[in-house]
Image (cartoon, rainbow, N blue to C red):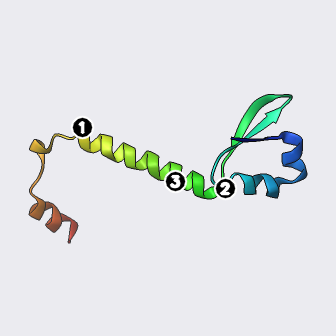
Amino acid sequence: MNTTSISELKTNPSAVIEQATDYPVAVENRNSIKAYLIGKNLFERMVSFIEDNLDINTVKKTDFKKGKDFEKVARELGI
């Protein structure tokens, strides 16, 4: 993982953001990590991963024996 200082982030934020495209960049202050900077694409992939896992867990917990008839639900939704 790449690291940078808060001073470097203030001095050249574009360069640090560019480093964070595929992997997080640890932001240090006095040799202690204070934050992580992640790029737009990585953030969107992380959100998608989390949402997918939430959906998977919901499906696993669902009791489909208590389900409704698909045709009835489709009519109610107008599809």
Q: Which mark is residue 22?
A: none
Quick one: SS at disc 1? helix
Report the mark closest to the observer, 1 or 3.
3
Q: Quadrant of the C terminus?
A: bottom left
What is the three-letter code of the residue carrying label 1? Lys
Q: What residue type is labelled 3?
A: Arg
Residue 69: image quadrant is: bottom left
The percent position of residue 19, horizontal first and vertical second, equals 73, 53
Crowd rating for badge 3 (residues with CA inside 10 Å; few <14, some 14–19, many 20+): few
In the image, is residue 65 above or below residue 44? above
Distance between the alpha carbons at the discs numbered 2 and 3? 12 Å
Q: Residue 63 appears at what percent x and percent y?
A: 16, 40
Q: Which residue in the structure is indicated by mark 2? A: 21
Instruction: Estimate how packed mark 1 is, as few (under 14), some (14 to 19) or many (20 or more) residues with alpha carbons within 10 Å.
Output: few
Circles 1 and 2 in contact, beta carbons < 8 Å: no
Find the distance from the CA under tag 1 to the CA under tag 2: 35 Å
Q: Residues within 10 Å of mark 2 (few under 14, many from 20)?
A: some
Q: What element carries label 2?
A: loop
What residue appears at the point 89 percent right and 42 percent down from the top-left corner? 7
In the image, farthest residue toward the bottom? 79
Q: Which residue corresponds to the image point at 45% horizontal and 49% vertical from the top-left?
A: 49
